[in-house]
Image: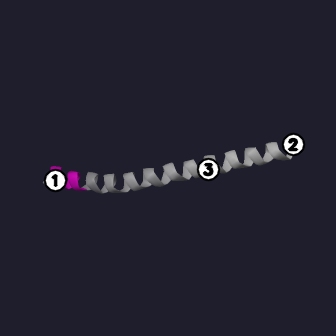
Amino acid sequence: MRRKKQYKDTEYTSAIKKMDGTLKRARSIAIPAHRVAKKVEKIVNF
């Protein structure tokens, strides 16, 4: 029983780490994309 719980906990933490990594990656992509979109908007408006 104890071993099973430990396995579940490690699986859970690894899932959280994966989520955290994807969130960080998505944020690092989204911020520059937003800036580029703003620049493009300015160019289109002029």
- Under mark 1, the amino acid is Ile
The residue that disc 3 covers is 16
Looking at the rendered structure, which numbered label has been put on residue 10? none
Q: Main secondary structure of the magenta part?
A: helix
- What is the total number of numbered labels drawn onto the structure image? 3
Q: Position of residue 33 (x, y in %)?
A: 32, 52
Magenta extent: 39-44
The residue that disc 1 covers is 43
Q: Position of residue 8 (x, y in %)?
A: 74, 44
Q: Residue at the location (48% across, 55% down)?
A: 24
Q: Quadrant of the C terminus?
A: bottom left
- Under mark 2, the amino acid is Met
Quick check: marks 1 and 2 in contact, CB under 8 Å? Answer: no
The residue that disc 2 covers is 1
> Residue farthest to the left?
46
> Looking at the image, which is closer to me, 40 or 13?
13
Q: Report how far apart the C-alphas of labels 1 and 2 lie in the structure.
A: 63 Å
Q: Position of residue 4 (x, y in %)?
A: 80, 42
